[in-house]
Image: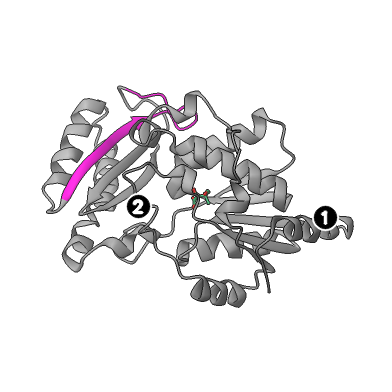
Amino acid sequence: MRLIKEISQMKTWSETSRKNGLRIGFVPTMGYFHEGHLSLMRRAKELADKVVVSIFVNPIQFGPQEDFRDYPRDLERDARLAEEIGVDVIFTPKAEEMYPEGFQTFVEVERLTKPLCGARRPGHFRGVTTVCLKLFNIVKPHFAVFGLKDYQQYLVVKRMVADLNLDLEIIGHPIVREKDGLAMSSRNVYLSPEERKSATCLYKALCLAQEKVKKGVRIVPTLKQELEQFIISHPYTEIDYVEFCHPETLDPVKEIAGPTLLALAVFVGKARLIDNTLIEP
Ligand code: PAF
């Protein structure tokens, strides 16, 4: 496995691979790998001749009060895990090279970034789409794999790729969970043992909603109230949002009349956790 740090070297590697007719699969990450990341890499391996994984904690997608400085990092461990899976290149660009002095161009997807995490984290998706477009231009993949835990991110990146006629496919990969249902996330390391127990309330809330809908509860304000009460009955929790929306437009829905995305963001201690499920009545 190669470790590439410079943009020019990454571009040369990709150009050569493409000239040799190889199909490049790409997994963009911020590192500190867990089983969720590894499953994205395995999926990419199945579909590609060569797999590139980027590790870059992207400063422009964090708000000023967010956890950019504390975000967990362990390149040595990440490189070992990626190598075991058979990743061909780890690309770790430097922030100074990605955003040199004078940098002033950003990409913005308009409507899809307004609700959910976009409403709570101003500028977040502008940072995500900008870095993804830069990474796509550097790595030149035929496809990129994104985890569906960040469902809104997946939709936003897919929209950008379609709107800007980029020549790659965006593949969504199912959420990977711990045994007790907690969605895997690099931010789970922030949880104390007590908070970790409470954190299962996100997954349990998703299951509760599925059950209620199965039993015929379809009115969103009623469902929302029950879920919110359920979540805050767990210690250390603070709800950021509980939203039911259309799975493609992310427009809010008032009643469950067709496939509906239930998306949650909950602070458990200082960790802001997100999760989601598709409800099909
Ligand atoms: O999901 C992530 O880890 C990040 O948002 C991404 C896609 C790597 C962009 O920085």
Question: Which amino acid, by three-letter code, is at mark 2?
Answer: Asp
Q: Which residues are magenta?
A: 237-253
> In x, y percent, where is residue 248?
50, 30
Q: Check if mark 2's residue and mark 1's residue have beta carbons within 8 Å.
A: no
Q: Residue 188: x and y, percent?
A: 32, 61
Residue 71 place in picture, x, y as percent: 39, 58
Of the residues tagged 2 and 1, which is closer to the observer?
2
Q: Give the residue at x 61% y 58%.
A: 93
Confirm whether the magenta stretch covers residue 219.
no
Q: Whole-Å distance between the Cαs marked 2 and 1?
A: 35 Å
Q: Which residue is mark 2?
A: 67
Which one is nearer the viewer's eye here, 155 or 99? 99
Q: Report which quarter residue 216 is drawn in.
A: top left
Tell me what residue is drawn at x 53 percent, y 35 percent.
156
Q: Which residue is mark 1?
A: 15
Say above or below: 200 vs 129: below
Quadrant holding the N terminus: bottom right
| Residue 99 marker | none
Q: Please identify the residue farthest to the front as the structure is shown.
A: 101
- Quadrant (top left, top right, bottom left, bottom right) of the C terminus: top left
Crowding near the residue tagged with mark 1, few <14, some 14–19, many ≥20 C-alpha atoms within 10 Å: some
- Image point 58% across, 57% down: which residue? 94
State the residue in front, 13 or 233.
13
Residue 60 place in picture, x, y as percent: 48, 43
In the picture provided, is 58 more to the left or to the right than 136?
A: left
Residue at disc 1, secondary structure: helix
